[in-house]
Image (cartoon, rainbow, N blue to C red):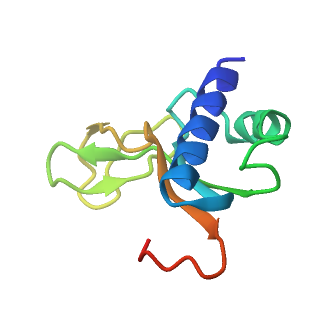
């Protein structure tokens, strides 16, 4: 359920972006969601389809890029996706520790549909 308020905020930001660019509607919102962010992309998408009705985001394409978590070897610095139940580095067999990779949650970009003849450079 915590995807609902964050989806409202995504739509608010996209609608505001469309207004700033004098656009009729939002064509695409690209999100980056890490597997460890606490948010589920499918839930965001489900809420988005419902909440966006009647807004400049209705019918827009929601593109979600997943980021898998990675760890970093404390010996050689190699960054890698760990195997289940193992923190062993595939390069030097050292021990890996956590990184922030996989905790991401952000709007990468927003594409809007501009009115024809609107040439202010945005």
Residue at 61%, 45% in the rendered image = 15
Position of 47 with respect to 96 (left or right) is: right
In the image, residue 19 above or below residue 39: below
* Residue lying at the far top of the rendered structure: 1
Answer yes or no: is residue 67 visible. Answer: no
Quarter of the image for residue 50 reads top right
- In the picture, the quarter occupied by the C terminus is bottom left
Position of 109 with respect to 15 (left or right) is: left
Position of 33 with respect to 103 (left or right) is: right
Is 77 or 85 nearer to us in this picture? 77
Is 66 or 5 nearer to us in this picture? 5
* Residue lying at the far front of the rendered structure: 117
Position of 8 with respect to 101 (left or right) is: right
Where does residue 43 sit, x and y in percent of width and height? 75, 33
Where does residue 46 sit, x and y in percent of width and height? 82, 37
Residue at 67%, 34% in the rendered image = 40
Where does residue 48 sit, x and y in percent of width and height? 76, 39
Where does residue 71 sit, x and y in percent of width and height? 34, 44
- In the picture, the quarter occupied by the N terminus is top right
Residue at 50%, 34% in the rendered image = 85
Quarter of the image for residue 98 reads top left
């Amino acid at each position: 359920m915590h995807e609902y308020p964050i989806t409202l905020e995504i739509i608010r930001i996209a609608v505001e972006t469309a207004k700033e660019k004098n656009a009729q509607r939002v064509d695409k919102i690209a999100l980056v969601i890490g597997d460890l962010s606490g948010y589920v992309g499918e839930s965001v998408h489900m809420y988005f389809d419902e909440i966006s009705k009647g807004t400049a985001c209705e019918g827009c394409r929601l593109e979600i890029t997943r980021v898998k978590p990675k760890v970093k070897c404390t010996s050689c610095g190699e960054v890698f996706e760990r195997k289940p139940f193992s923190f062993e580095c595939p390069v030097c067999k050292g021990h890996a520790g956590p990184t922030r990779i996989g905790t991401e949650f952000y709007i990468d970009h927003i594409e809007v549909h501009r009115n024809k003849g609107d040439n202010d450079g945005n």
